[in-house]
Image (cartoon, rainbow, N blue to C red):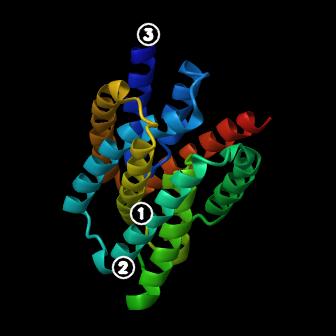
Amino acid sequence: MEWIVVTLASALAGMVDAIVGGGGLILLPALFAVFPGAAPATLFGTNKSAAIWGTAVASWQYSRRVAVRWPALWPGIAAAFAGAFAGAWSVTLIDPSFLRKLLPLILLVLLVYTLAKKELGRTHAPLFQGRQEQWRTAAIGAVIGFYDGFFGPGTGSFFVFLLVRTLGYDFLNASVSAKLLNLSTNIAALLLFAAKGHIWWHFAVPLALANVLGSVLGSWLALRHGTGFVRVIFIVVVGGLIVKTGMDAI
């Protein structure tokens, strides 16, 4: 029964994560519910061992269909890797539970802002070029990368929102770039968790396969229905994150 529950959760997480991020909203709570006595770092590591494959497949699918701003993105990818590695190392030393009370408030602000700005992310009009865009992408990668390695829930949604709000991307292009940044953070965190022995490898393969299947479906839906669809899913996922993290904080 444990295998079935977490495998189904991984498939659903892969689908949601491929569209707009937030797969951790589904798989991580499932792991914590099924294995309440496990070390948090081990469950975070096992989650990463599945999520990385779904994110990689989604990144590949998106990059074939959507023009990626690679010169601007590479500094962000490098910064996200460094940030996530530092964050994953920190979670092996510090309990991240103090973030549980703060996270719902941050997400609520993000959701209210997105709903209030109805045209936010509907048009792809990058606000910066050259080094200005690179520095901003690197800053986003470093900050959210550290958060992903240290805690994690909502990472994809934070990436998407900041790329839309700060750089002027639409939701579809932001989702594509967020996948590539998130792939970098997942690789860094996975390397650290693996080195520290915080991965259940016997769960890694079935969870990864399920995550990839969900990711393929999610990418297809996003590319088929476009920016408006991604924006709606973003709002739904952030709303779900607020409810879930709010309940955890009580």
Q: Looking at the picture, how far across and down is residue 18, in whole percent? A: 37, 47
Quadrant showing the N terminus: top left
Residue at the disc numbered 2: 72
For marks 2 and 3, give the CA distance.
45 Å
10 Å crowding of disc 1: few (<14), some (14-19), many (20+): many
Marked residue nearer the N-terminal end (2 or 3) = 3
- Proximity of marks 2 and 1: CB atoms separated by less than 8 Å: no
Which residue is depicted at the point 42% across and 35% down? 199
Name the front one of labels 2 and 3. Answer: 3
Q: Looking at the picture, how far across and down is residue 170, in whole percent? A: 43, 67
Which residue is depicted at the point 40% across and 45% down? 195
Residue at the disc numbered 1: 81
Q: Give the amino acid at mark 1.
A: Phe
Circle 3 SS class: loop
- In the rendered view, tell whether residue 15 sits above or below residue 79: above
For marks 2 and 1, give the CA distance.
15 Å
Circle 2 SS class: helix
Quick one: 164 or 44, which is closer to the camera? Answer: 44
Quick one: 236 or 158, which is closer to the camera? Answer: 158
Q: Is residue 53 left or right of residue 237?
A: left
Residue at the disc numbered 3: 1
Q: Give the amino acid at mark 3.
A: Met
Q: In this view, does 201 lie to the left or right of 236?
A: left
Circle 1 SS class: helix
Q: Give the amino acid at mark 2.
A: Ala
Quadrant showing the C terminus: top right
Q: Looking at the picture, how far across and down is residue 233, in whole percent? A: 49, 47
Name the front one of labels 1 and 3. Answer: 1
Which residue is depicted at the point 76% across and 39% down? 249
- In the rendered view, tell whether residue 235 sits above or below residue 63: above
